[in-house]
Amino acid sequence: MEKAKVAVFIGSASDEATVAPCADILKKLGIPFRFTVTSAHRTPERTAELVDSLEAAGCEVSTCPAGMVAARTMKPVIGIPVAASPLGGMDALLATVQMPPGFPVATVALDKAGARNAAWLAAQILALHDPELAHQIRISRERFKSDVAVAGAEIEAKYC
C-alpha cells in the first residue's frame, strides 16, 4: 500500500458514513490516504501517535472533525464538522472554527458536503506540487460545469 498523503480521521465509527465521501473522492483522484477512527477525547495517545507517525511517513494533509490534530502538526488540517449531537452540528462547527491563533483549521461545510469539500481542498493543497493532480482537478471542474449546463437545459426543456 502506498504511503498516505492524506489522513482522514473520524472520532467514532458512527461518523464513517458521513465522512466516507471524502475517501471516495481521494480514491477517485488516486491520492493515497489513511482512513481511521481515533478520538481526541477517548484516545488522545492514539491520536497523537497516528498524527506523528503519518507525518513522519510523508503524510501532507489531515482531515478531521476537531482541532487536536492541529496542535500536533505544522501540516494543513481540514476540519469536517459532523452533526452528531442534538445541536445539529452547530457545536461541531463552532469547535472547528474557534481554534486559537497559530493553530488554524481550514473548515468546510457540515457532514457529507463538507467531507467532499475536504477531499477537494486536500487535493488542491497537494496539487500545488503535483501538476498531474492539478490537471485532474481541472478536468473534474469542467465536468461539474458541464453537468450544470446539462441540468439547466433539461429544466428549461421541461418548463419553458
Image: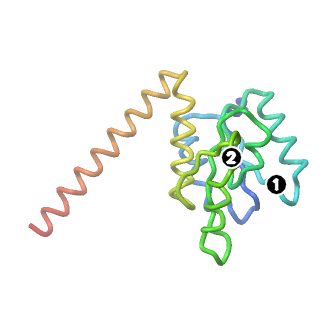
Percent position (x, y) of residue 45? 91, 48
Instruction: Say what amino acid the circle numbered 1 marks.
Output: Ala
Marking on residue 118: none
Percent position (x, y) of residue 24? 56, 48
Instruction: Say what amino acid the circle numbered 2 marks.
Output: Val
Relative placement, left or right, of 56 versus 123 is right
Secondary element at image label 1:
loop
Colouring mode (rainbow / by chain / secondary structure / one colour): rainbow
Residue at (51% x, 34% y) in the render: 124
Where, quadrant-wise, is the C terminus in this rendering?
bottom left
Marking on residue 8: 2
Residue at (48% x, 23% y) in the render: 132
Relative placement, left or right, of 114 versus 44 is left
Percent position (x, y) of residue 88? 60, 73
Q: Residue furthest left?
A: 160
Secondary element at image label 2:
strand
Q: Residue furthest right?
A: 45
Count of marks, rendered view: 2
Q: Is residue 56 above or below residue 26?
A: above
Q: Is residue 81 above or below residue 6?
A: below
Place residue 34 in its image quadrant.
top right
Q: Earlier in the sequence, mark 1 or mark 2?
A: 2
- Rate crowding at label 2 as few (under 14), some (14 to 19) or many (20 or more) other CA atoms within 10 Å: many
- Tell me the mark number nearer the camera, choosing from 1 and 2: 1
Q: Which residue is under mark 1?
A: 40
Q: Is residue 58 above or below residue 98?
A: above
Relative placement, left or right, of 156 versus 73 is left
Residue at (60% x, 68% y) in the render: 90
Give the distance between the C-alpha atoms of the residues marked 1 and 2, in whole angstroms: 14 Å
- Rate crowding at label 1 as few (under 14), some (14 to 19) or many (20 or more) other CA atoms within 10 Å: some
Percent position (x, y) of residue 129? 55, 21
